[in-house]
Image (cartoon, rainbow, N blue to C red):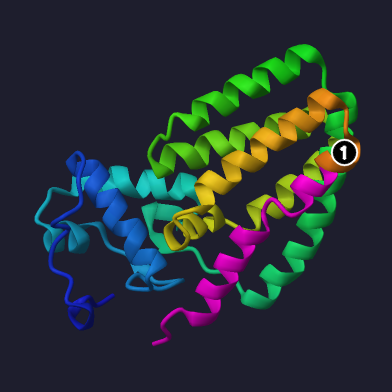
Amino acid sequence: MSFADHGITSFAGISGTVHERVRDWMRSAIVDGTLKPGSRIVQTEIAQLLGVSPTPVREAMRDLAAEGLIKVHARKVATVTAIDAAELRDIRLLRETLEGLAARLCAERITEAELNKAERMQEEMERDPDLGKYVELNRAFHLYLYDAARSPRLTQMLLSLRTATPGMLSVAFMRSKERRLDGLDEHRRFLKACRDRDLDAAEAIFRTHSSVAFHEMEAFLENRPID
């Protein structure tokens, strides 16, 4: 891994605690291609580059692993997550179809108590937490709605597809600053469709809900720097 060609020597200008600044710098470096897919992440090298101890780098790597942007292997070796663009397009077709079906079943089967809880989860996301926290909350929100659809096999299929597209939401939000607000609006409209028991509207909203994120991820893969 080399940073010389990118002119990167520090994370000056990034706000927050040291841990948060390291995490945000690493996230940006992954999205802009400075840290390339499949490349090994060396804690000591990043710590030396940024002028920090290894501890905040280790904490940042833990957060980015939870987002799906890096993978931690045996003996704590970490690499930037890699996925093939052609594979991503296939996953997109499956996700859009199955997300629509899950949304339809959810709108039909969700209980009043479950809908109230989903609305509280939505309110927590509306408070605009940092990106890492938002990704975590968003995942919990969608998994909760999958469960409300009461189709365990469908849920397992969707979980498998989500696992196959790690880091997609983080990449989308880094490349398209409006995506978070648009996504929250889609959540609100979906929850209203559930309250109205409008199955067609619920299906239509979630069938395309992830389309922008997939588009940004595809553009990222097609245009990422190549050694």
**Quarter where residue 2 is shown:** bottom left
Residue 150 appears anywhere in the view: no
Q: What's the magenta bit mostly, secondary-structure-wise? A: helix
Q: From the viewer's perspective, tell me whether residue 227 is left or right of residue 108.
A: left
Residue 64 location in percent, x, y? 41, 50
Residue 126 or residue 129, whichever sits in front:
126
Instruction: Tell me where residue 39 appears, x and y as whole percent.
Output: 39, 71
Against 72, residue 197 (above or below) is above
Q: Secondary structure at mark 1?
A: helix
Q: Which residues are magenta?
A: 203-227
Q: Residue at x 24, y 51 (%)?
A: 22
Q: Which residue in the structure is indicated by mark 1?
A: 104
Which residue is at 74% across, 29% downward? 192
Crowding at mark 1 (Cα within 10 Å: few <14, some 14-19, many 20+): many
Image x and y of residue 14, in percent? 20, 52
User: Which residue occupies the foreground of this view, 94 or 59?
Assistant: 94
Q: Quadrant of residue 155?
A: top right
Q: Amino acid at mark 1?
A: Arg
Queried whether the magenta region covers residue 205, the answer comes back as yes
The residue most toward the left is 51
- Does any portion of residue 113 appear in the rendered image? yes
Q: Quadrant of the N terminus?
A: bottom left
Q: Position of residue 59 (x, y in %)?
A: 30, 42
Name above or below for residue 8 compared with residue 124.
Answer: below
- Whether residue 58 sits left or right of residue 167 in the image: it is left
The residue that appears at 18% across and 71% down in the rendered structure is 8
Q: Quadrant of the C terminus?
A: bottom left
